């Protein structure tokens, strides 16, 4: 089942902001992960189990993540950490590639939004998400990124010293106060 159609949430409804939604599942290796969970007796929260049974394929990129439903954000973050740290899942992680962590970050976020947004007893019923980019195509288009003023460091770009230097210089130039706070924090 693909992502639901995009519709702007009502201004008074709770919202979560993320960078874009992704319907192309070639980046995700859900089946090997679920097979590992089954083979090793791993654990997944109800949101994930429901979403997988529904055969949903939408994922949410968390390049930008925020909102004003702090209860939802806390629940998602704590549940994602529990998926990673749960003792029953320890044997699964070594069987996967390092890039499969996006399942917990992106696929699970979509699962939480869908499950908790529709569950009758959920305090987050009706929760909607908004995106900076209309789709993943625009998110990877440099012209769109420039248009919305977003620097998307994906994959190995996060460890590229040239890119990091350019970004540091930009933050130092455009946001000197914030840059100083970062330096103070880094220097302890």
Image: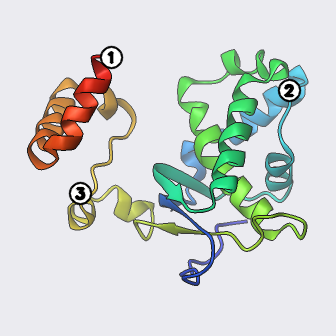
Q: Earlier in the sequence, mark 2 or mark 1?
A: 2
Mark 3–mark 2 Cα distance, whole angstroms, equals 40 Å
The residue carrying mark 2 is 42
Q: Is residue 48 left or right of residue 66?
A: right
Q: Earlier in the sequence, mark 1 or mark 3?
A: 3
In percent of width and height, residue 186 lies at 30, 21
Residue at x-position 63% and y-position 55%: 70
Mark 1–mark 3 Cα distance, whole angstroms, equals 35 Å
The residue carrying mark 1 is 188
- Which mark identifies residue 140? none
In percent of width and height, residue 188 lies at 32, 16
The residue carrying mark 3 is 142
- Residue 106 vs residue 57, the one in the foreground: 106
Residue at x-position 63% and y-position 40%: 103
- Residue 139 vs residue 13, the one in the foreground: 13
Is the residue 17 above or below the residue 158 in the image?
A: below
Labelled pair 1, 3 in contact (Cβ < 8 Å): no
- Residue 10 vs residue 147, the one in the foreground: 10
Question: Could you tell me how many numbered marks the image carries?
Answer: 3
């Amino acid at each position: 089942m693909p992502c639901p159609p995009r519709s702007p949430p009502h201004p008074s409804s709770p919202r979560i902001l993320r960078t874009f939604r992704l319907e192309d599942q070639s980046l995700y290796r859900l089946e090997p992960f679920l097979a590992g969970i089954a083979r090793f007796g791993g654990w997944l929260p109800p949101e994930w189990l429901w979403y997988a049974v529904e055969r949903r394929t939408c994922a949410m990129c968390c390049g930008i993540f925020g909102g004003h439903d702090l209860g939802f954000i806390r629940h998602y973050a704590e549940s994602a950490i529990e998926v990673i740290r749960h003792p029953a899942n320890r044997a699964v992680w070594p069987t996967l590639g390092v890039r499969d962590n996006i399942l917990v970050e992106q696929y699970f976020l979509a699962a939480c939004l869908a499950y908790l947004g529709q569950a009758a007893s959920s305090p987050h019923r009706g929760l909607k998400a908004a995106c900076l980019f209309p789709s993943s195509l625009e998110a990877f288009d440099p012209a769109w990124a420039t248009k919305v003023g977003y620097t998307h460091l994906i994959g190995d770009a996060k460890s590229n010293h040239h890119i990091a230097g350019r970004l540091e210089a930009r933050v130092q130039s455009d946001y000197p106060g914030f840059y100083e706070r970062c330096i103070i924090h880094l220097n302890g």
